[in-house]
Amino acid sequence: MITVYGRNTSSNVQPVIWLLSELNLPHKRIDAGGSFGGTDTPEYRKMNPMGLIPSLEDDDVTMFESQAIMRYIAGRHGEEFWPTDPITRAPIDQWMEWAKTTIAPNVVYKVFWQLIRTPATNRDHAALEEAVLALRHIMFIADDQLSKNDWLAGDTMSLADISFGAQLFRYFTLPFERAELPALSAYYSRLTERPAYAEHVMVSYESLRAPGA
Ligand SMILES: N[C@@H](CCC(=O)N[C@@H](CS)C(=O)NCC(=O)O)C(=O)O
């Protein structure tokens, strides 16, 4: 059975568990990281030398790095999310990496970090404003893509949607000014109707709020 280590409030754990759930794969999640701790032990560091979450164990495989974990899961157990044909796979990988390297740093590491993880008195308003402006520009790219396709990388749901869609709960619920993007809003609304998304991504982040944030 697949075991994933990591708390359910982590933006890197959520896409992994969402994917497992979309694929109906039996799995268990063990709380680790944040207030649960458990990531500093020698046993944990053998799985994940960074001491971060998520980590995965599956029979003969132990690994870390959420995007690599998702590729492993889809490659071994859910080819429909990451087909083997390199031509079909190329746009999926492209959008998956775009979500992780361009969207996540702005949504999670800047906007979320400043608004939720940082007391208001310590807030870096310049960094927050910079990320909000960046998102106002970059999200047009997703909106344009989603006005032409139902899913980020084409006609079917793929790892690109798991990686990108997992950022959208925070993007749409954090209190900051977003551009009006109808195709993106409609896509998010469709995601919220998926039981696996509602359960594993639309997870309250109040427990992560810093005092005074
Ligand atoms: N590149 C890594 C980043 C992992 C990461 O930064 N995880 C955060 C949680 S989102 C973490 O472990 N933070 C420390 C903790 O929660 O104890 C991945 O995608 O898996």
Image (cartoon, rainbow, N blue to C red):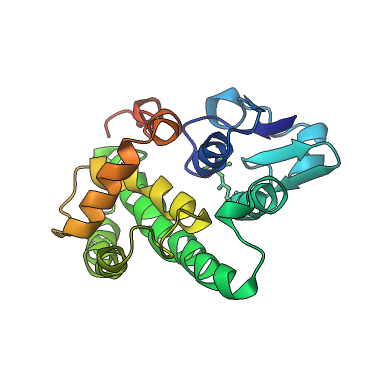
Q: Nearer the viewer, residue 87 or 119?
A: 87
Residue 179 picture location, percent across and down = 16, 60
Q: Nearer the viewer, residue 70 or 74?
A: 74
Task: Say left or right for 140 vs 77.
Answer: left
Q: Quadrant of residue 4?
A: top right
Residue 123 visible (yes or no) = no
Residue 161 picture location, percent across and down = 44, 54
The residue sitting at the bottom extreme is 87
Write the residue at 25% across / 56% down. 184
Q: How many marks?
A: 0
Q: Quadrant of residue 143?
A: bottom left
Residue 11 picture location, percent across and down = 47, 42
Image quarter of the C terminus: top left
Q: Nearer the viewer, residue 108 or 209?
A: 108
Residue 170 picture location, percent across and down = 32, 43
Write the residue at 75% across / 47% down. 63
Write the residue at 49% across / 37% down. 10
Split into quadrants, the picture shows ligand 1 in the one at top right
Task: Say left or right for 39 vs 17.
Answer: right
Image quarter of the N terminus: top right
Compared with residue 17, is residue 77 higher up or lower down, i.e. above or below?
below
Residue 183 visible (yes or no) = yes
The residue sitting at the right extreme is 60
